[in-house]
Image (spheres, coloured by chain):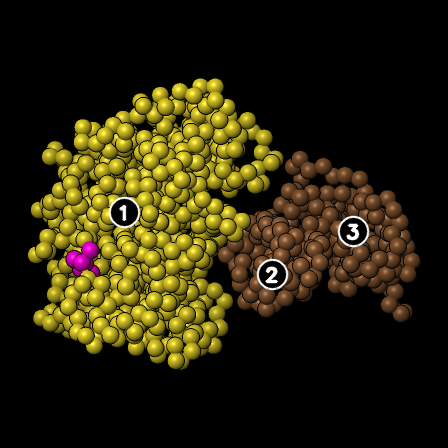
Amino acid sequence: MSNDVRPQSLSTFPRLLMHHAQARPNHPATREKDMGIWQAWTWSQVAEEVRAMASGLAELGFMRGDNLAIIGDNRPRLYWAMYAVQCLGGVPVPMYQDAVAGEMVFVLQDAGIKFAIVEDQEQVDKLLENKAQCPELQHILYDDPRGMRHYNQPFLHGLDEVQEMGRIHNRNHPEFLDGEIELGKYEDVAVMLYTSGTTGKPKGVCQTHGAFIKAAESGCEFDKLGPDDNILSYLPMAWVGDHLFSFAQAGYAGFTINCPESGDTVMTDMREIGPSYYFAPPRVFENLLTQVMIRMEDAGAIKRSMFHYFMGVARRCGAEILDGKPVSGGDRLLYALGNLLVFGPLRNVLGMSRIRVAYTAGAAIGPDLFRFYRSIGVNLKQLYGSTETCAAVCLQPDGQIKFDTVGPPAPGVEVKIADNGEVLVRGEVLLKEYYKRPDATAESIDAQGYFHTGDAGFFDEDGHLKIIDRAKDVGKLANGAMFAPNYIENKLKFFSQIKEAVVFGAGKDEVCAFINIDMGAVGNWAERRNIAYSGYTDLAQKSEVYDLIRDCVEKANAELAHDAMLSASQVHRFLILHKELDPDDDELTRTRKVRRGFIAEKYGVLIDALYSGKASQFIETEVKFEDGRKGKVSADLRILETKTYPAQAAKKAA
Amino acid sequence: MSNGRQIGEVILDLQNISLRFGGVKALTDISFDVREHEIRAIIGPNGAGKSSMLNVINGVYHPQEGTIVFRGQKRHDMDTHEAAEAGFARTFQNIALFKGMSVLDNLMTGRNLKMKSNFLLQALYWGPAQREELEHRRKVEEIVDFLEIEHIRKTPVGRLPYGLQKRVELGRALAAEPKILLLDEPMAGMNVEEKQDMCRFVLDVNDQFGTTIILIEHDMGVVMDISDRVVVLDYGKKIGDGTPEEVKNNPDVIAAYLGTSH
């Protein structure tokens, strides 16, 4: 990597920040809803805040090369903290804010965290709990002083005070910070993001300024993002997706990030801001759709029939119109009417009226879910990438959208398929290394410089990459047919009633499934039918609910029967779990991916019951609450058989 | 509790209070005091006279006998609005909110006493009325932030779950910026999680604003955890008074709650 292709002035994120402060001083850089009102900071104000914070950190003894943890919801000052740390040549390490104290220890120790900037008292408490185990942790800075009045430990500092200290420092040493920024180089590590740890302990992925600037550049040019775009920053800051969109791309293109008031207000905030650029994992799109469907169920008969009629029109021609493909005049007219009556208002309610480009990534998205958003006129596209590749391997170009692929490789990225079907990636966006893990680095980057993603996939006839599953998850049934669990789970999860599914079948004759019902959708459905229930465990075991879920599973089976490769993977039996799978119980990763191996082990008795043909099975499970306390949930789980269909590989309907 | 809060002088002194409804003695010769910035709990079995005691304090009932000394001055029989002006605010055992109005509007009603500009200007939303309204709205937003109810700001109160309605009611009382906050069973009917939240808010109110809090509560765990001092009533008589620890070991209190063996 060299910086001769890029002007020196734009080769690190702090330099980009100073560039924006000069080039567009009065353009809003960051907004946050505070006291019910959207407050904005311009690029020049952000630069000032960052300068104050950086010098304040330097006053506290922060050194070049130190790692600093950032923990909290998406707050402006936490984003600015990344710039501030980078100004001093340090490395910000954003961490998942909803992790319980014990889970943080590993990363704090592994990264040798000396400084932490956290959101509030809750996060401070977690760090204090861990402090004995993390002797290197020297200073904790907090953004929100509420509840902190009686904390008088000398190593706790309010960000306000630290920034004030920095301002004084900057007045006395006006050239100090610019000198520090000058020392930053393109190939320096800009940020360390920990992998979610689907397998084993998390690893710290070191990404350079160069890699993220390259990833941001190709994304911005690909979709023509400029300073006038707006994005809602609501995803965990520790996730590579948020880092790319809310930090790297915003810092590259100079567009505005908007921080929601709280996690509960995202829907309202989104409607108020009307972002032009939007990023969400499939889960969020799924939840939104579920909410829309629930509300439509509650709507009056006229509205409901209008909705269903025009959604039919949209399914027929909406996506084609968005792609600029030929559509008959009659359909065009109907779609325009539907746009006026249904799609427009619906987009408005979802806060998607102004979206030019929306992306989803992080997990495969159900084709029907994907199609829904495109058909109502939201330009939703898929991208493919991982923490190790700055989330920028493949992007779908406008007008070339396929529901089951993630598009051709992004500019400047080489993608190759290994003999075993694994996707290999080479390019500037690759990680520099795993922090202090030369073994893992050597294992995942081969001699030719290809990164082994661990995903299985292939290129279709148009050169678009299709990802099937994790390479290690793809297995075979006892009869030799291919078994891609994720693919089946996604099919099941498209039903709004099913929140989570885990299927088993590798090496077995048949496929069986665990189901988590969606409390919102099924709860609403049950209330409508006067089915009384006391909570998740109770509702999940109602026979009506089992019947409802069986219908869903059978529909999924019917679809699978049409698939040439996977018709053998139809689900034969299923049960509804007595508790929701939860990252606090290690069943899901923090990015909410299913930890199949762990679940198989924890619920081994249930799997045995599924395959032994029992009608029910008793289970007791320990659960962890958010505050770290433990409790027990037990239930007698019923197991239901489902109808399967003969394979109809030849014609691919639906 | 070991935080830095300073418990001050006696702010409210109730001396020999007796309250009768016809022949029914609701309260008999009750004396206790409340210090500034403390959390004072009133507990007792059903029908012990706890709510009557609160109603005496905020001027709904006027006791036939006894004296109320507030800030060193003997208090005459005051009306409820006078009590409100003197800095008393309360929440109710059965939620008393405007169900059809949004959370924001309900909180704004709590500011009613503080609204000075005349009603004509308010109706026109003009001049000083506008400035005042903005100021009130800012104050209300602080409470919204404090109680973490941003997501329901514009939701009609009637549509909220019970625990949240209780929280809104606390917010409405806080909007009046009270010196003394009277809470009538703030945790009644809540689940464990809601109770924990409510405890945290009560402690935060006390800690951040220095508000003196008098609360009635059934949940002994809650009372013992958050109160500085507890007074125990039974059949309209005071049977115990002191720190939670003292009260817990008081034989009369144990007898009233658990019964005595004969």
In the rendered image, which residue does mark 3 sit on? B86
Give the overall secondary structure of the magenta segment. Answer: loop
Element type where label 1 sits in the image: loop
Given the image, on which type of amino acid does mark 2 rest? Answer: Asp
Q: Amino acid at mark 3?
A: Ala
- Identify the element where label 3 is drawn: loop
- Chain letter for mark 3: B
Q: Mark 2 to mark 1: distance in Å?
A: 41 Å
Q: Which chain is brown?
A: B
The magenta segment: A398-403
Residue A582 among magenta residues? no
Same subunit: marks 2 and 3: yes
A171 on left or right of B240? left
What is the letter of the yellow chain?
A: A
Residue drawn where x is 28% and y is 50% of the image: A362
Residue occupying the far bottom of the picture: A301
Q: Are marks 3 and 1 on the same chain?
A: no
**At 35% from the left edge and 72% from the top edge, which residue is drawn?**
A341
